């Protein structure tokens, strides 16, 4: 198909960035196909992929002859490229949309120690979590402080309806909640509710995820 959508990801199903693009495509309701690459075998560095994707990383999206890398760019492209009857995922209001982008940028650029010390493999692949270092614990506390401020009291979503930032923030919070690290109950409940969405459950079906009470 000339306009077929193909999402390229890693065969380990642990990448938070592939997760973001996958959930966005699922929520948007557009047909797409997954192509899995082995990062261990360095398949992402093969010229036919690295040259076309520009970055040689995952995820990358191929839409016909158009290629796009970087998960947040993919999320926005998918939302803008497919109009009704597909639901809008980014808010129409310019300030709400900017806030969604801010949260997506935050979870990708900050909290480095938390991402290292609580990798997604601890809940997607069953890898045991090690004790936090002081830096990792500080990052965890910073995540909680910021998440508590950006998620309105009593709200199910960051801006009134589901957005890709909800998937990204929920995954970041699961680094704590799924590993039974300290996480306020309302934030843990929010993360669990996002992870109960059909779009996320579809991803989890490819992992060793086990629900945590």
Image: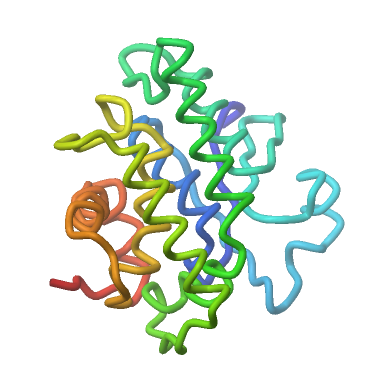
| Rendering colour mode | rainbow
Report the residue at 78% width, 54% height from top: 56
Q: Which quadrant of the figure contains the C terminus? A: bottom left
Position in image of residue 22 (x %, y %): 45, 47
Q: How many marks?
A: 0
Q: Is residue 132 above or below residue 37?
A: below
* Closer to us: 23 or 85: 23
Report the residue at 30% width, 65% height from top: 205
Position in image of residue 13 (x %, y %): 47, 66
Q: Is residue 130 above or below residue 65?
A: below
* Closer to us: 42 or 160: 160
Q: Which quadrant of the figure contains the N terminus? A: top right
Report the residue at 35% width, 69% height from top: 176
- Is 210 on the left-hand or right-hand side of 1? left
* Closer to us: 136 or 119: 136
- Is 28 on the left-hand or right-hand side of 108? left
Report the residue at 44% width, 55% height from top: 143
- Is 195 on the left-hand or right-hand side of 50? left
Q: Is residue 171 above or below residue 167?
A: below
Position in image of residue 187 (x %, y %): 25, 53
Position in image of residue 101 (x %, y %): 53, 30
- Quarter residue 31 falls in: top left
């Amino acid at each position: 198909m000339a306009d077929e959508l193909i999402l390229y990801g890693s065969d380990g199903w642990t990448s938070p960035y592939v997760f973001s693009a996958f959930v966005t495509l699922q929520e948007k309701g557009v047909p797409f196909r997954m192509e899995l690459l082995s990062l261990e075998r360095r398949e992402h560095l093969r010229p036919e992929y690295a040259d076309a994707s520009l970055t040689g990383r995952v995820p990358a999206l191929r839409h016909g002859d158009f290629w796009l890398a970087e998960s947040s760019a993919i999320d926005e492209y998918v939302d803008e490229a497919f109009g009704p009857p597909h639901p809008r995922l980014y808010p129409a209001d310019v300030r709400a949309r900017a806030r969604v982008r801010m949260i997506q940028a935050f979870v990708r650029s900050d909290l480095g120690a938390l991402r290292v010390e609580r990798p997604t493999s601890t809940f997607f692949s069953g890898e045991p979590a090690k004790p936090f270092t002081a830096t990792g614990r500080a990052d965890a506390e910073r995540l909680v402080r910021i998440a508590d401020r950006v998620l309105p009291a009593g709200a199910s979503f960051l801006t009134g309806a589901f957005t890709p930032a909800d998937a990204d923030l929920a995954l970041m919070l699961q680094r704590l909640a799924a590993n039974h690290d300290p996480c306020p109950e309302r934030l843990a409940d929010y993360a669990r509710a996002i992870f109960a969405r059909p779009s996320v459950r579809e991803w989890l079906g490819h992992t060793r995820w086990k629900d945590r009470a």
